[in-house]
């Protein structure tokens, strides 16, 4: 099962950092938050990634193109026939990473629509954002999705604040979806979604369509959106304070999302 990660937004609320690099490349410790998200999925056995690139996407391409240089000690032999020797190995050698340009100005609906060709032959895929970490039980969310038979199952988390509120029935069916309401109550969309490829029936080639607006609201209205309730740790990196918090947790060895 492939993992689709939305990496193209401009991260305007973190402008002091994202002016120079895309938000998924902001570091937690010595590695970008995108790497931490990918490690969570890889720990659960999902190692085929599709990255939806946009704003400053070349920096993400450069990071993975030079992954050995970024993660290993090396010796260069500057002879007539140059040679490079890498002295250390990394634990990501079995990852497959597709770097997909989904438009500099596209919103999330368009970004997902554009990567459909990379899911040929699949009936289910995983989808999340490139700026939030948590100790999510991904296999449990997949099982929840399969039991429900719905088109999309998102991970419902308790909010740090400011995010989209979900209205849930007792059977975890989402019957209301309001993106970023003024009141901060109930569960919110924490990403880490499990999606049927029937999701593409709700999308169109329109760069102004946000996945979190018409498509997800329509699915919720039709009873086709489910929720996997996660009561553990989840934290986005949406402000400088959250950037500092996540780095403090990592540097102090108290990062709850480090399950690998």
Image (tube, rainbow, N blue to C red):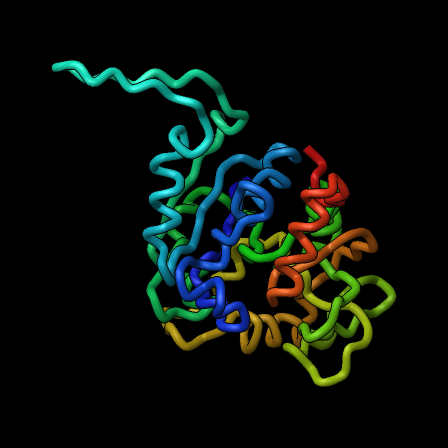
Give the quarter of the image for residue 52: bottom left
Quadrant showing the C terminus: top right
Percent position of residue 142, x then y: 69, 46
Q: Quadrant of residue 80?
A: top left
Residue 85 lies, with reference to residue 246, above or below; the image says above
Identify the residue at the far bottom of this view: 182
User: How many numbered marks does the figure carry?
Assistant: 0
On-image quarter of the N terminus: top right
166 to the left or right of 19: right
Residue at the (49%, 72%) spot, across then down:
12
Residue 136 appears in the rendering: no
Residues 134 and 173: in front is: 134
Tell whether 2 sits left or right of 233: left
Residue 212 makes an appearance in the image: yes
Tell which of 177 and 32 is nearer to you: 32
Residue at 42% from the left image edge and 34% from the top image edge: 70
In which quarter of the view is residue 259 placed?
top right
């Amino acid at each position: 099962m492939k993992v689709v990660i939305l990496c193209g937004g401009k991260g305007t609320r973190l402008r002091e950092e994202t002016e120079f690099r895309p938000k998924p490349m902001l570091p937690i410790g010595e590695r970008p938050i995108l790497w931490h998200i990918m490690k969570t999925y890889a720990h659960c056995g999902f190692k085929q990634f599709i990255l939806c690139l946009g704003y400053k996407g070349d920096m993400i391409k450069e990071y993975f193109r030079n992954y050995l240089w970024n993660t290993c000690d090396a010796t260069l032999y500057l002879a007539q026939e140059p040679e490079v020797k890498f002295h250390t190995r990394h634990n990501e050698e079995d990852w497959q990473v597709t770097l997909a340009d989904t438009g500099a100005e596209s919103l999330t609906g368009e970004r997902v629509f554009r990567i459909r060709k990379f899911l040929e032959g699949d009936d289910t895929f995983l989808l999340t954002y490139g700026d939030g970490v948590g100790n999510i039980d991904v296999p449990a969310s997949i099982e929840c999705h399969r039991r429900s038979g719905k088109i999309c199952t998102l991970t419902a988390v308790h909010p740090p604040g400011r995010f989209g509120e979900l209205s849930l029935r007792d059977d975890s069916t989402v019957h209301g979806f309001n993106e970023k309401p003024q009141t901060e109550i109930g569960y919110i969309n924490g990403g880490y979604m499990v999606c049927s490829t029937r999701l593409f029936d709700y999308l169109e080639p329109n760069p102004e369509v946000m996945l979190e607006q018409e498509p997800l609201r329509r699915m919720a209205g039709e009873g086709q959106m489910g929720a996997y309730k996660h009561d553990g740790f989840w934290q986005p990196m949406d402000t400088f304070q959250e950037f500092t918090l996540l780095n403090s947790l990592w540097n102090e060895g108290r990062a709850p999302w480090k399950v690998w």
